[in-house]
Image: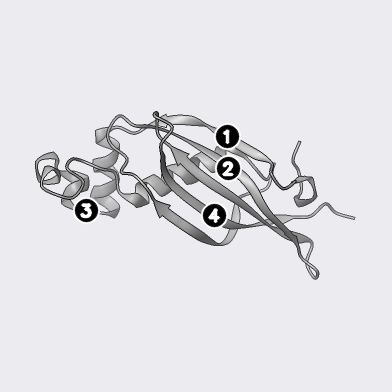
Amino acid sequence: MIEWFDDLKLGMRFKSGAVTVSREDIKRFASEFDPQPFHMDEAAAENTAFKGLAASGWHTAAIAMNLAVQVRPFGPHPLLGAGVDDLRWMKPVRPGDTLHLEGEVVELVPSRTKPQGIARVKWTAYNQHDEPVYTFNPIGIVPRRPT
């Protein structure tokens, strides 16, 4: 069981449950945070590079964050971060797509001055066809085991 930075190991893997993205979810998120035609209007979206309604990349990122929180890769500790690297949207997320998240611990750096460490988990979101749709590599701050 993971409780502290010290319990994490390079190569450790995590996998989330799945969530299906509805047409209504896509439009609701877009109307509040990314009100562009290809996220809100099927007819208008047909005449764009997406050739149909597609979720906002930020919606995909929010879904991935929710799935990462549910996985609890740092045990009881929150997913506190200092930034994100290598964020990429690789494929549009469409109405009816079912997404899940997979992660791998790729870097662990204990702090020399604080009771914490930096844990890097490379996360990739996949659709129901196991096609990667989104990837990100957050800089996680995880407490060390008290001495």
Residue 15 is labelled as: 1
Q: Amino acid at mark 2?
A: Gly
The alpha-carbon separation of the residues under discs 1 and 4 comes to 15 Å
Residue 40 image offset from top left, x and y in percent = 19, 45
In the depicted view, which residue is nearer to us: 113 or 89? 89
Q: CA distance from mark 4 to mark 2?
A: 9 Å
- Residue pointed to by mark 3: 35
- Regarding mark 1 in the picture, which secondary structure is present there? strand
Q: Residues within 10 Å of mark 1 (few under 14, many from 20)?
A: some
Query: Is tag 3's residue or tag 2's residue first in the polypeptide sequence?
Result: 3
> Percent x, y for residue 107?
68, 55
Q: How many residues crowd around disc 4 within 10 Å: few (fewer than 14), some, or many (20 or more)? A: many
- Is the N terminus in the top left, top right, bottom left or bottom right quadrant? top right
Task: Write down the residue under mark 4.
Answer: 137
Q: Which residue is mark 2?
A: 103
Q: Is residue 125 above or below residue 98?
A: below
